[in-house]
Amino acid sequence: MRRAGSVVRQVLNVVRDAVRPGATTLDLETAAEQKLAELGAKPAFKGYHGYPCVLCTSVNHEVVHGIPSKTRVLREGDIVSIDCGAIVDGFYGDAAITVPVGNRIDGKTQKLLEATESSLAAAIQAVRPGATLGDIGAAVQEVVEAQGFSVVRDFVGHGIGTRMHEDPQVPNYGERGRGMKLREGMVLAIEPMVNAGTAAVEVLKDGWTAVTCDGSMSAHFEHTVAVTADGAMILTL
Ligand code: CO
């Protein structure tokens, strides 16, 4: 799973470098497809319940599952979430980042990116044998809500292994001490989705793209993380 995680990270690095004003989200998809092929890995998303691409590219108020498109042109000041999954020898890796387009992002949006990424870091800090799913959710929720932002509840993280989505579901909200206990050897995809406004989201008529109901910006970061005796081992570094 470390190898699958490494592939995902290498793809995200290539795609991040391709993010610039004037690029389309299909340009990002093409860069990702090439890198996956070069690394000899299979995409995890393409064909999953009919999903058409190797990446999800979700711009601004799009939360997750945005479909790359040649008509979606990135503009200075946009943010784009890039989510990628890969399969290596039957094992899955899954990770996401949200990056600014250009270098004139507004202050509140910058704060949203930082809060979302640090909420993921706090969740990973909570991972150890004996900790609970509620500990993870509470860690995310505290960081996010302290900044005045909202945790999305309609989508959750997940177990991952020889399938992309395995039990358990990993909510980004919860109460410490509640929920299933983590055990050594479990692997989780932890993926906070955070809105600048309210938590409400809806899925567009394309059947995939989730957007914020209030039109506010949304950010998403994800790592695939193994539970070890010493705590979390991040497989998508
Ligand atoms: Co995931």
Image (cartoon, rainbow, N blue to C red):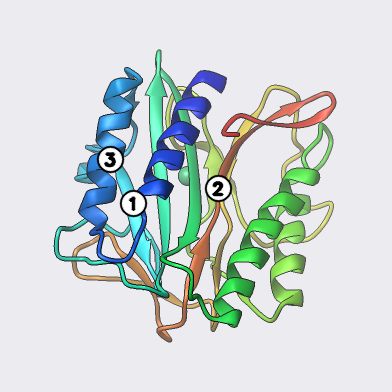
- At 45% from the left and 37% from the top, the residue drawn is 165
Outermost residue, front side: 103
> Percent position (x, y) of residue 10?
46, 32
Give the numbered dot on residue 140.
none
Tell which residue pokes out farthest to the left in this image.
71
Q: For this rendering, which residue is in front, 197 or 205?
A: 197
Q: Is residue 60 left or right of residue 159?
A: left
- Name the residue type under label 3: Ala
For the point 55% across and 76% down, which residue is it?
A: 109
Whether residue 181 appears in this view of the structure is yes
Tag 2 residue:
222
Q: CA distance from mark 1 to mark 3?
A: 13 Å
- The image position of residue 81, as x and y in percent, is 43, 58
The answer to whether any part of residue 1 appears in the image is no
Distance from mark 1 CB to nearest ligand 1 atom below 8 Å? no
Q: Give the residue pinned by disc 3.
A: 31
As drawn, 60 above or below 232: below
Nearer to the camera, 149 or 21: 21
Query: What's the mark number on residue 56?
Result: 1
Query: Residue at the location (58% across, 57% down)?
Result: 192
Give the CA distance from mark 2 to mark 1: 12 Å
Q: In the image, is 83 to the left or to the right of 205?
A: right
Q: Nearer the viewer, residue 221 or 48?
A: 221
What's the residue type where badge 2 is placed? Glu
**Callout in the foreground (2, 3):** 3
